[in-house]
Amino acid sequence: MSVAVLGSGSWGTAFAMVMADAGQDVTLWARREEVAATINDTRRNADYLPDTELPDNLRATSDVGEALDSAEIVVLAVPSQSLRDNLGDWGGHIPQESAVVSLMKGIELGTSKRMSEVITDAGDIDPARVVVVSGPNLAKEIAARQPAASVVASTSPRMRARVAEACATPYFRPYLGGDVVGTEIAGATKNVIALACGMASGMGMGDNTLASLITRGLAETARLGTGLGADPQTFLGLAGVGDLMATCASPLSRNRTFGYSLGQGKTLEETIAATKQVAEGVKSCKSILELARSVDVDVPIVENVEAVVYEGRSTREVVTALMSRARKLESN
Ligand SMILES: NC(=O)C1=CN([C@@H]2O[C@H](COP(=O)(O)OP(=O)(O)OC[C@H]3O[C@@H](n4cnc5c(N)ncnc54)[C@H](OP(=O)(O)O)[C@@H]3O)[C@@H](O)[C@H]2O)C=CC1
Ligand SMILES: O=C(CO)COP(=O)(O)O
């Protein structure tokens, strides 16, 4: 199959490698010409995955028209907040019959839209063509070809089957799903919970704190998702608890690392300056909070992370705020 992957950061490159390993003919679009040239010349993405040798059936280009030409699957792997603008530039080139895959885990600022909604809006794509891939998929581990599983979700059985078939390898196992809303809410919200876990670790807190944050983080994620019409089962699966466990625990997570820096007492500005890759939760905490308020769902961990990032609250203050909330039933 002919596949275009638009975005050559950590996950775009690693997922392009997965699809090439699965036997597809893959073209990876890089916005900088020198990145495309280096990939073609050295078989490595020196900026993002320098230790990974990329297969020969993966080639790079900085010409989006060339990447998209006759693609049967178009994979989008750019930061969530730039997607709308990118689609404004690319929309006309996306082939009519292609499946359009979102790898992004974020919610758009200003509109509180999920990435599949941005794709249908800004790219003028039929929702049935959109497929979301989400799960515990830290790019560096996938690039090292360590076994992992993921959810390939779409309302269209045909489109999700096409994408799952195209990315199945001995080390990457796709599961099929129909709950696009739940899969996207799980993926975006876990980044904010990972920020909170990083903050706690940076402050020196141990495993009880992390387990409490992960468990209550899952509860508020599921509450938000079901409030938006998602299937509650999704949150117990790979895109839910699976991705939460990987991201909240791993030093490879950019969101966890960002939170850790704040927990250690670095300022927001210092932390942003030290962060070279996208940590989606930093922006999405605000859009997720707005989304939750729009459906009257309580998301206290998200709310407190947002207070640190956008309102200058200290990590100590938010620990006190979370621990002194009114008592309630665990199941509520
Ligand atoms: N990394 C991971 O482990 C995983 C990431 N994801 C999700 O995948 C998405 C992409 O993440 P990831 O690849 O890791 O991000 P990275 O930060 O590693 O790479 C971002 C990529 O987007 C490009 N880019 C940045 N700004 C723009 C813009 N305005 N227009 C077009 N391209 C732009 C960058 O180009 P340049 O190099 O020129 O700056 C780079 O190629 C995120 O939503 C993330 O949450 C999902 C699962 C796993
Ligand atoms: O989504 C991820 C793993 O599944 C990657 O998380 P980070 O963006 O925090 O690195």
Image (spheres, helix red, strand yellow):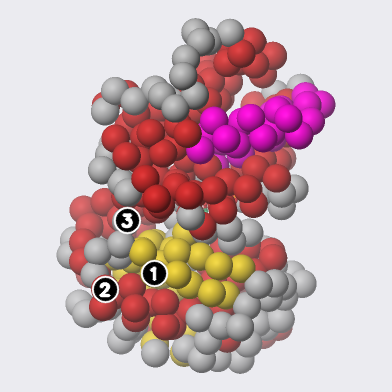
Q: Residue furthest right?
A: 204
Neighbour tally class for label 1: few under 14, some 14-19, many 20 plus, Cα within 10 Å: some
Q: What is the crowding at mark 3: few (fewer than 14 residues within 10 Å), some, or many (at least 20)?
A: many
Q: Give, as a three-letter code, the residue at label 1.
A: Leu
Specify the quadrant of the image occupied by residue 103. bottom left
Residue 252 visible in this rendered orientation of the protein: yes
Question: Looking at the image, which residue is at 78% across and 26% down?
Answer: 205
Residue 67 in percent (x, y) is at 40, 79
Q: Which marked residue is nearer to the observer: mark 1 or mark 3?
A: 1
Secondary structure at badge 1 equals strand
Q: Residues within 10 Å of mark 2 (few under 14, many from 20)?
A: some
Residue 180's disc number: 3
Instruction: Say if mark 2 contacts mark 3, CB within 8 Å.
Output: no
Residue type (three-letter) at the residue carrying disc 2: Pro
Q: Is residue 96 above or below residue 117?
A: below
Residue at numbered disc 2: 157
Which of marks 2 and 1 precedes in the sequence?
2
- Counting the numbered discs, the total is 3
Whole-Å distance between the Cαs marked 1 and 3? 11 Å
Q: Considering the numbered disc 2 on the image, is that residue within a helix, a strand or a loop?
A: helix
Earlier residue among tags 2 and 3 = 2
Q: Quadrant of the C terminus?
A: top left
Magenta segment:
191-218
- The residue indicated by pointer 1 is 176
Task: Determine if the magenta segment contains residue 212.
Answer: yes
User: Marks 1 and 2, how far apart in space?
Assistant: 8 Å
In percent of width and height, residue 156 lies at 24, 70
